[in-house]
Amino acid sequence: MHHVLRTTVLYLLLAPGAFAQERPSLSPAARAYVEIDAPVIALTHARLVDGTGAPVRENQTIVIDGTRIAAVGAGGQVAIPPGARVIDLTGHTVTPGFVGLHEHTYFSATTRTTQMAVSGPLLYLGNGVTTMRTAGSQFPYEELNMKRAVERGDLPGPRMHITGPYLNGAGSGGRSRGLATPDEARRVVAYWGEEGATWLKFSGSITRDVMRAAIDEAHKHGMRATGHLCSVTFSEAAALGIDALEHGFITNSAYVPGKQPDVCPGDNMRIQADVDVKSPAVQASIRELAAKGVALTSTLAVYETFVPERAKLNPRAMEMLAPDTRREVEETHATIARGGLVVPVRLIRKMMQWEYDFVQAGGLLGAGVDPWGTGMLPGFGDLRNYELLVEAGFAPPQAFRIMSLNGAKILGEDRLTGSVEPGKRADLVVIRGDPVSTPADVYNVVTVFKDGYGYSTERLLDGARGLVGIR
Ligand SMILES: [Zn+2]
């Protein structure tokens, strides 16, 4: 019996077409964004960054069969199946589809916050994000319905893990859910788990006792928890069993002198700028988080938009904004340039150092965009993160790993996605040029494969043009 089982497993692993799965159906409207549409596809002569952190390989052939990657190897050593659609990628780089971890689907400009119900999925996918997790929702039902529209094949977009509303401390206003007691936390978390959230997101002023109950309830429902923390330190949250933390160094209030339990110290962004990342206390906290297996999401791109010396508006991204929203973003950008509400340049360098040290200590780092009205947009910010991770000191294959396989691990999907390996989902990014030697080439995404369909970036961006701020 044991022997028979093993033979069967071997057959499944080795048989031609073993990975083939029929591609999901797409509505005619969604199919209009697809430029490479064939059941078997061979990408040839590609430069490959496979997402595992392994060195770049030149002249690779990647065979896609249905929704899966069937073969990867040097040109001439991988058989191209008869009837395959062959795409010559000379001069192009292939990476895994990106796994983005702080991918909001709303956009907050100065006067209003709107759901990117159409533009968000198109912009994430068009810039290479094939799997994403949101990190706090302002319109949780719109987000849930958007995810379902993508799953039905009515709207092109990434696979989504979604959070419910932001979970904050008692008395919180706006669209967040203020939680006063552990019982209340359990009830709200269980509700959102049943509604379809697979993660939850804490923010600002939540207290430890409420957080403890929420995390415990989340884990009972197979959900995971992350947070943009302030009242609770990273170390305290790790002890409560939190799965991930957002933003890193800048939001760890443990580094603020005189921090009171369960209280968010005001002005921590200013104070943090003068904390020494290389001090024994900070380094010990980095090692503690890494050892506890708490994952971290890097969001350098959005913080850079608050740094006057460095903030730049990407003209291609600005075209995606509705005219009124674009005016507000440009005004905010100008205010920051004049010195209002800024992140000091030395602070963003400390954030980079902290993240680099976290990875050296064995920590699991992912990345996400955190779209914001300072001019950071879905997808475009994920690509900017690549340049910033390289600037932080990561070798290009490591930076891509942070954006793909690490994200997949954090989501528990690394068996299915996150690297270019046989048997994994055919989720791939095709980039014109060589982002390994020229990081800015990362913006030249031309085609994004998801589930074996090759979507045209040009068409996806055209579909979102002028819509951010409207829908
Ligand atoms: Zn956020």
Image: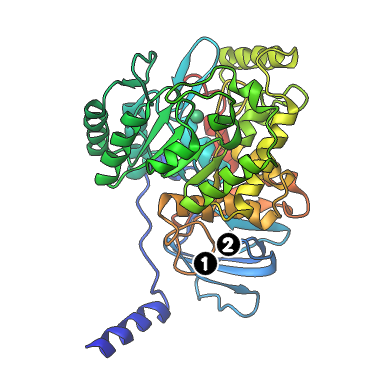
Can you tell which mark lies on residue 392?
none
Nearest-to-viewer mark from 1 and 2 = 2
Whether residue 16 sits left or right of residue 434 in the image: it is left
Looking at the rendered structure, the kind of residue marked 2 is: Thr
Residue that appears at 37% across and 83% down: 10
- Distance of label 1 from label 2 (alpha carbons): 9 Å
Residue that appears at 35% across and 51% down: 25
Instruction: Give whichever of 97, 202 is nearer the camera.
Output: 202
Query: x, y percentage for residue 12?
Result: 36, 78
Question: Dividing the image into 4 quarters, which one contains the N terminus?
Answer: bottom left
- Secondary structure found at label 1: loop
Whether residue 442 sits left or right of residue 25 in the image: it is right
Which residue is the site of mark 1? 421
Query: x, y percentage for residue 337?
Result: 74, 16
Asked if 71 appears above or below 343 in the picture, the reply is below
- Secondary structure found at label 2: loop
How many numbered circles are shown?
Answer: 2
Looking at the rendered structure, the kind of residue marked 1 is: Glu
Q: Residues within 10 Å of mark 1 (few under 14, many from 20)?
A: many
Question: Dividing the image into 4 quarters, which one contains the C terminus?
Answer: top left
